[in-house]
Image (spheres, grey):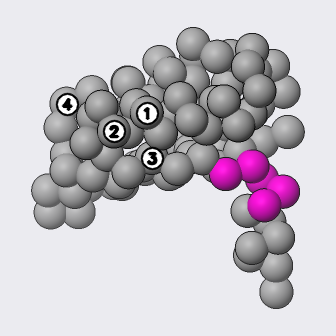
Amino acid sequence: MKAVVSVVGKDSVGILASVATKCAEFKANIDDVNQTIIDDYFTMFMIINIDELTIEFNSFVDKIQELGKEKNLEIHCMHEDIFNLMHRI
């Protein structure tokens, strides 16, 4: 199973590292990442594999959102099934 993580906020050092560390803490493997900086704003999308998560997915979502609050970022995590249903033509 996979999930989509989006990160948006004012650019600062270590954003990718902190999100990647939080994923690794719960054994979510990063399959793909795309990031860019527009003016002073950092944006990133990650595709993560959640097959080996050490906590329930909803708890992982809460943990990743807590990280966003700590870092003053908007971080959202959505299961691929929901993401695919939202973007079905």
Verify CB contact (< 8 Å) between mark 3 and mark 4.
Answer: no
What is the CA distance from the residue labelled 3 to the residue labelled 4?
A: 16 Å
Q: Magenta part mainly helix, strand or loop?
A: helix
What is the CA distance from the residue labelled 3 to the residue labelled 2?
A: 8 Å
Q: Which circle's residue, 4 or 1, is located before the other in the chain?
A: 4
Verify CB contact (< 8 Å) between mark 4 and mark 1.
Answer: no
Q: Badge 3, how many Cα within 10 Å: few under 14, some, many 20+?
A: many
Judged from the image, the secondary structure of the residue bearing numbered disc 4 is: loop
Q: Badge 1, how many Cα within 10 Å: few under 14, some, many 20+?
A: some
The three-letter code of the residue at mark 2 reads Lys
Based on the displayed image, in which of its 4 quarters is residue 38 positioned? bottom left
Q: Which circle's residue, 3 or 4, is located before the other in the chain?
A: 4
The tag on residue 69 is 2
Give above or below for 14 relative to 46: above
Q: Which circle's residue, 3 or 2, is located before the other in the chain?
A: 2
Judged from the image, the secondary structure of the residue bearing numbered disc 1 is: helix
Verify CB contact (< 8 Å) between mark 1 and mark 2.
Answer: yes
- Magenta-colored span: 78-82
Question: Residue at point 66% right, 30% down?
Answer: 59
Question: Residue at point 52% right, 50% down?
Answer: 76
The tag on residue 75 is 3
- Residue that carries the numbered disc 4 in the rendered image: 13
Residue 15: percent from left, percent from top:
31, 33
- Residue that carries the numbered disc 1 in the rendered image: 66
